[in-house]
Amino acid sequence: MKKNIFKILSFIVLLGMIISCRKEAALNVDLTKYNIDNPVANTDLDAWLKTTFLDEYNMDVIYRYSRYYYDNDKNVAPSNIASVRPQMQTVLDGFILPYRKIAGVAFIKKNVPKEWVMYGSGAYQTDGSMILATASAGRRVTIYDINNFNVNDASLVTGKLKTIHHEFTHILNQLVPMPADFQNITKSTYNATWTTVADATARDNGYVTPYASSEPVEDFAEVTSHLLVFGQAWYDARANASTAVGKAALKAKEASVVQYFTVNLGVDFRKLQQEIQNVVRNQYKYAPASFPYWMGQNLFKTMTINLESPIYADNGISSDFATPYNAFKAAVLAANSTQKYHLDYIQMRFESATVLTVRAAFSNATTQYFGDYSFNYTVNATTGAVTFTKVANGTGTTFNNGTLFTASFTNTIQAYLTGKTFIANWMPATINSDNFNSYGGFYLSGTPTNYFYGVLGQTL
């Protein structure tokens, strides 16, 4: 009996110690900082997801937390309910609808992943990298880190769109294998430990990102998604900044991707690229997709305007510009009754981010000549505002040739360009997919009907 009393007393003392320890070691945790999944069904969000995705595309959007849909070695947070619709609206606008328009209803309904799973945080790898999305078995796309999604942050939106297009490319490759030629373009420089590869090294070896250098399938998806979402100008700038070998590799990869989509899948890649770029440029206002941004980077070295080109008959040109252009053309023709010079084109030559030469190319029956005129220009890469200012001409043969038409140039082309503020933009809006990456121009600030544009070149 004494032994039992002793055991009972010992247990009570021990229990008191445990309770006491728990009180003293209480954690100070603010649980409001953690997302708590909302199990309520049939909400307005559920109704929108059902109508927009499930009914139309047989897509099930799973945003309520479940461990079933991610690897057991990962820890991820539930989705913030407020982030779900903006994220899926972006999927609709920047991914599904462009494919639907260009590839067709049957293509997108057949090939779009049927499960879209969302988690609030990123999924981290042992090498320190964070997974933003995954695709599996051609059926499911998992999107991570949606709690940081902000539809008003163009960089975040385009970054997530790029990831979605990357993952969908993997799904397409499961349906139709990627071209064998692509895998051999930079075969010797793939590196599984890509996180140790510097961006400049990847670029110079012919990759759009260090991640692209990890293996061919990731490379193909990275090239595709960057061309579609970041755009042709971004891709060309990447290639131009590379080595000669790297640039050749990047352009070869581009050609392989375009052929894969257009020939192997029957999807016009350039039309798809144009459609997605229209969303990125016009809806999300992504600065590096804008013409002023690349003017500020001096990517485009020339803009050539020849009003005899069929492109102007097809897409029109402002009479405000056509009138001085044609007046100068007539003056060139009348300048020498013997030679009968013809104005072949006007070319704006962007020598640097501030120096411009306006070139008049003219020819007689046998020879073409150049007449040059010097300007400075300013460009606001954010607003697109551009001004042109006439400065003293340079020296040399082409500037001497320009003196043949100084008076008429001053009263026509120079008078049109100077003393005004123009807005740089991709134009014309009606340009087709064969040319949309190649044309840009300017309209008079406040008067969009007063404009000019031309074919862009990246070398002088």
Image (cartoon, helix red, strand yellow):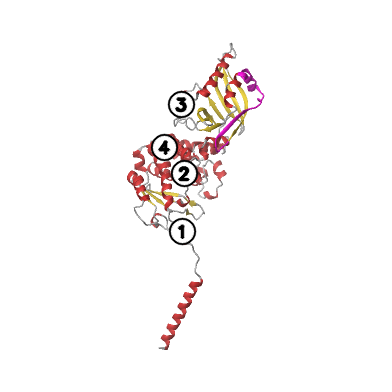
Q: Toward which corner of the image does residue 37 lie, by quadrant?
A: bottom left
Q: Quadrant of the C terminus?
A: top right
What residue is shown with label 2? Answer: 162
The label number, if any, that marks residue 315 in the structure image? 3
Numbered range of the magenta stretch: 380-407
Say whether residue 384 is magenta: yes
Residue located at (44% from left, 85% from top): 6
The label number, if any, that marks residue 34 in the structure image? 1
The first of marks 3 and 2 along the sequence is 2
User: In the figure, is residue 264 to the left or right of 150?
Assistant: left
The span from disc 3 to disc 2 (Cα, nearest Å) is: 31 Å
Dot 2 falls on a residue whose secondary structure is: helix
Res 333 seen here:
yes
The span from disc 4 to disc 1 (Cα, nearest Å) is: 43 Å
Q: Amino acid at mark 4?
A: Phe
Asked whether the beta carbons under mark 4 and mark 3 sit within 8 Å of each other, the answer is: no
The first of marks 4 and 1 along the sequence is 1
Q: Is residue 341 above or below residue 275?
A: above
Say whether residue 377 is magenta: no
The span from disc 4 to disc 3 (Cα, nearest Å) is: 27 Å
Dot 3 falls on a residue whose secondary structure is: helix
As drawn, the residue found furthest toward the left would be 55
Mark 2 or mark 1: which is in front? 1
The span from disc 1 to disc 3 (Cα, nearest Å) is: 55 Å
The first of marks 2 and 1 along the sequence is 1
